Image (tube, helix red, strand yellow):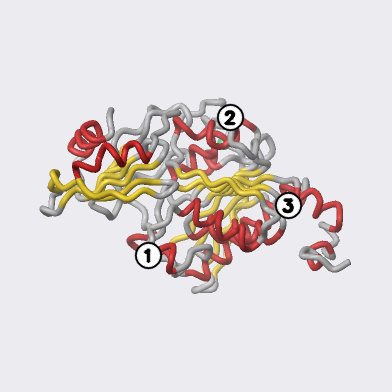
């Protein structure tokens, strides 16, 4: 009988049994920018039964060039990416159960978010992030809990990807012992990024994830792949496990054990992020009532946002405030972390 997955069942490595296996599988996608959108779209269409999508950001118009799960309406309403992605997946394939997590994936919350969510622990972790701190945190989690991890990065016209099978292959930290110093690497914000490169590397990531979820580790790529479709170059780099690797060699999970992040200025924006106390929840409607005397605020299911008319930002405009249900906040119009912390304590509570 023809069905949604007919063309995929025809593949010898999938078949009916493989399709059934995918429908019972769970992938966690950390970061739902360009890569996360691309992989989530492919895995949802392939019928991976459960997808947890973790992202802290809101959709912006500059995302639409390459972040394929979002549209103009999402940018106009500044929808949280994780929620907008899950809504879109519901339209693409209603058979997939999704769980949006609107949170900053950092050390204090990472294990709880990834392992204790309503969809259960994942069978694979997909890298949709844009920085090596978070990647090495995912890598720590992956090695500690024996979860396969599909790393990828893309900037300008080139991309890199590798798959980590803990206990079998080198981990990301074997290849990159420390994150590059801040500002030393080009980013999508400074060097731009070509949409087709994202589509290609997201395709490789999704294929790797499907092999893992099908139990076909024998098919998983054991090299680091670099390619640039714009310049027509491609390189495969053989990898060795580093016996001195702190993570997979010595079992020291330094990124997972890191101290909670303090207020963080957000790259490329006049704004500071305040991270919540782990495990806290805020009733956004109650907060909105309390803030009514201080400015105009709107609430959605996921966040509260508006302007504090009694607080002037660095350009003289009122300070903007966005608060998420987990207590995380973005204080807009300021770049001084101490000032942002003071504003948070004054209006939200410490
Ligand atoms: Zn290692």
Q: Position of residue 315 (x, y in %)?
A: 12, 54
Q: CA distance from mark 1 to mark 3?
A: 37 Å
Pointer 1: what residue?
76
Camera-side mark, 1 or 2: 1
Mark 2 Cα-neighbour bin, 10 Å: few <14, some 14–19, many ≥20:
some
- Mark 3, Cα crowd under 10 Å, few <14 / some 14-19 / many 20+, is many
Residue occupied by mark 2: 249
Badge 2 marks a residue whose secondary structure is loop
Please give the name of the residue rendered at 40% of the width and 50% of the height, measured from the top-left corner. Answer: 300
Q: Depth check: 142 or 328 in front?
A: 328
**Residue at 39% from the left image edge and 46% from the top image edge:** 303
Task: Decide which of 282, 332 is in the foreground and name it.
Answer: 282
Residue 128, given in percent of the width and then of the height, sits at 51, 52
Give the residue number, with chain letter if any, for mark 3.
211
Q: Callout 1: 10 Å neighbours few (<14), some, many (20+)?
A: few
* Residue 152 or residue 67, whichever sits in front: 67
Disc 1 CB within 8 Å of nearest ligand 1 atom:
no
Locate residue 34 relative to residue 309 in the image: left or right. Answer: right
How many angstroms separate mark 1 from mark 2 (CA)?
47 Å
Quadrant housing residue 133: top left
> Does the numbered disc 3 mark a residue whose Cβ is under 8 Å from ligand 1?
no
| Disc on the earlier residue, 3 or 2 | 3
């Amino acid at each position: 009988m023809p069905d949604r997955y007919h063309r995929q069942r025809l593949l010898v490595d999938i078949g009916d049994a493989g399709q059934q296996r995918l429908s019972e599988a769970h992938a966690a996608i950390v970061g739902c920018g360009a890569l996360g959108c691309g992989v989530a779209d492919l895995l949802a269409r392939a019928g991976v039964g459960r997808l947890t999508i973790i992202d802290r950001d809101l959709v912006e118009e500059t995302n639409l060039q390459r972040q394929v799960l979002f549209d103009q309406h999402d940018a106009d309403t500044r929808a949280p990416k994780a929620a907008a992605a899950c809504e879109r997946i519901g339209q693409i394939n209603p058979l997939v159960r999704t769980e949006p997590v609107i949170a900053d994936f950092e050390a204090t919350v990472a294990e709880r978010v990834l392992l204790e969510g309503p969809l259960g622990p994942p069978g694979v972790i997909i890298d949709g992030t844009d920085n090596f701190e978070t990647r090495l945190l995912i890598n720590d989690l992956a090695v500690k809990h024996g979860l396969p991890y599909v790393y990828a990065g893309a900037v300008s016209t080139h991309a890199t990807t590798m798959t980590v099978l803990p206990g079998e292959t080198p981990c990301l930290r074997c290849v990159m012992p420390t994150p590059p110093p801040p500002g030393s690497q080009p980013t999508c914000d400074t060097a731009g990024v070509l949409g087709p490169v994202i589509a290609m590397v997201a395709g490789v990531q999704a294929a790797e994830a499907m092999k893992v979820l099908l139990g076909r580790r024998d098919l998983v790529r054991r090299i680091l792949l670099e390619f640039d479709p714009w310049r027509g170059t491609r390189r495969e780099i053989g990898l060795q496990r580093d016996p001195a690797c702190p993570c997979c060699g010595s079992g020291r999970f330094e990124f997972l054990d890191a101290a909670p992040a303090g207020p963080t200025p957000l790259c490329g924006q006049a704004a500071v992020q305040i991270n919540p106390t782990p495990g806290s929840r805020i009733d956004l409607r109650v907060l909105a009532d309390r803030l009514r005397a201080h400015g105009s605020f709107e609430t959605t299911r996921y966040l509260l946002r508006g302007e504090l008319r009694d607080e002037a930002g660095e350009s003289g405009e009122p300070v903007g405030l966005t608060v998420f249900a987990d207590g995380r906040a973005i204080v807009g119009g300021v770049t001084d972390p101490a000032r942002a912390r003071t504003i948070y304590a004054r209006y939200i509570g410490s």
